[in-house]
Amino acid sequence: MRSFTARKHNEACRDLYERIVAKGKRKNIVSIAVCINLLKQAFALAKSGLIYDGNYKSTLVKH
């Protein structure tokens, strides 16, 4: 259920969802990918101790 909310409010999750669906993947598989992305975000925040910033852009990912 968290993946549905994340698609609406989290830009990174929404982009991930749209990108994978465009490749023709099934929506339940895409929801799992969104959940994994959320877990990675939560772990990174917990590990770093930083506060979530919705406008943060990674310098590691090439756009």
Image (spheres, helix red, strand yellow):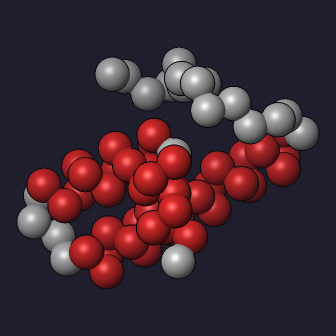
Q: Report the side of 2 relative to 31 (left or right).
A: right
Q: Residue at x 84, y 50 (%)?
A: 46
Q: Report the side of 38 relative to 12 (left or right).
A: right
Q: Residue at x 44, y 27 (%)?
A: 61
Percent coordinates x, y for residue 48 in the rendering: 84, 38
Percent coordinates x, y for residue 9 in the rendering: 51, 48
Q: Residue at x 38, y 49 (%)?
A: 14
Q: Report the side of 7 relative to 54 (left or right).
A: left
Q: Quadrant of the C terminus?
A: top left
Percent coordinates x, y for residue 25 in the rendering: 17, 70
Q: Compared to 38, does 30 lie above or below?
A: below
- In the rendered image, the residue lying farthest to the right is 49
Label count reads 0
> 30 or 44, which is in the foreground?
30
Q: Compared to 60, does 35 lie above or below?
A: below
Q: Compared to 40, does 51 lie above or below?
A: above
Q: Residue at x 74, y 37 (%)?
A: 52
Can you tell which quarter of the image residue 31 is in?
bottom left
Percent coordinates x, y for residue 18 in the rendering: 25, 51
